[in-house]
Amino acid sequence: MTGLPDDGRDFLGYGEHPPRAVWPEGARVAVSLVLNIEEGAEMALSSGDERNEATYEVQEELVGFRDFCMESHFEYGSRAGYWRVMRVLEEFAAPATLNLCARALTRTPWLGRNAVERGHEIMCHGWRWEHHNAMSETQERELIARCVSTIEAECGVRPVGWHVKSHPSANTRRLLIEEGGFLYDSNVYNDDLPWTLRGTERPYVLLPYAFDTNDMNFFASRRFVHGNDFSRYCCDAYDWLHEEGADRPKMMTVGLHTRIIGRPGRIAGLRDFLRHVRDKGGGWIARRDAIARTWIASNA
């Protein structure tokens, strides 16, 4: 007896000998580019929310008044950053997954349609850019349905992936499975490979997300300052996974935000990383739904 709670946590995972992922054309690394679309879903008194967002280019929460500064910073992502990112992705024929807040889509419906027309995937990032940990089961169930119907109506496709801001509730995954139309969620950060849940009626995959290979490090932590800080870190991660992938292929997620990497002083970091993956070879840049389906086909 250890005296520890049976909390369902798994500290071993695949252990020393993970399964062999079978990616197309013998790729060593499946690279997932996730472009977070949160503009219009940030907390704002002007949107009827309970407070203003405090996490943006300037780290400050304005209390009790409409925050025109914060709102303008978020607007940069859809007005300028999105197009800059799309041009770089197009340069390398790199498909991405848009992690899109449904409320953001109601403010920028053209963005979702444009992304679908370009061949990118729409994953749901919740309704607002918010945590789900304190939601009741009823509230969260209704929110999931609202998100699905909104994305279907505005984009003509339904999301099969889900990833909320950092903290899901204890019910989130079960509700997604019960809803029936979801293939995967990404509210896990604990591996370099997907894994398939057991005991579900249909295959359901957990696709790990990452906070280190992520442009969010230009903000609060300030780990990245220049565009090449981002590219160097991501290239180092890719090179290591590429080496391991000689006999045990892996998965790598790169987190992006239109209002962050989409700035002119940072965007070269994304271009340099994609050029590195192309020139080194061995990478399969793919949408997350494609990675999930490929994983199921070979490792379910």
Image (cartoon, helix red, strand yellow):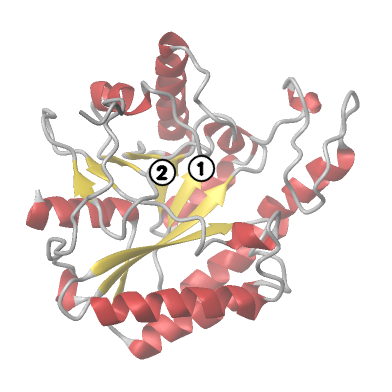
Distance, label 2 to label 1, CA atoms, is: 6 Å
Q: What x and y, as percent, mark residue 118? A: 44, 60
Residue 69, quarter of picture: top right
What residue is shown with label 2?
Answer: 123
Quadrant assignment for the N terminus: top left
Q: Amino acid at mark 2?
A: Met
Residue 92 in view in this figure: no
Q: What x and y, as percent, mark residue 236? A: 45, 79
In the image, 267 versus 84, the foreground residue is 267
In the image, 130 versus 18, the foreground residue is 18
Element assignment for label 1? strand
Element assignment for label 2? strand
What residue is shown with label 1?
Answer: 100
Residue 58's label in the rendered image is: none
Q: Amino acid at mark 1?
A: Leu
Neighbourhood count class around disc 1 (C-alpha, 10 Å): few under 14, some 14–19, many 20 upward:
many
Which badge, 2 or 1, comes first in the chain's sequence?
1
Picture residue at 72% right of the left edge, 44% below the top = 55
**Drawn side of residue 278 relative to residue 135, left or right:** left
Neighbourhood count class around disc 2 (C-alpha, 10 Å): few under 14, some 14–19, many 20 upward:
many
Q: What x and y, as percent, mark residue 4? A: 30, 28
Q: What x and y, as percent, mark residue 41? A: 64, 35
Marks 2,1: beta carbons within 8 A: yes
Picture residue at 70% right of the left edge, 57% below the top = 219
Picture residue at 72% right of the left edge, 22% below the top = 49
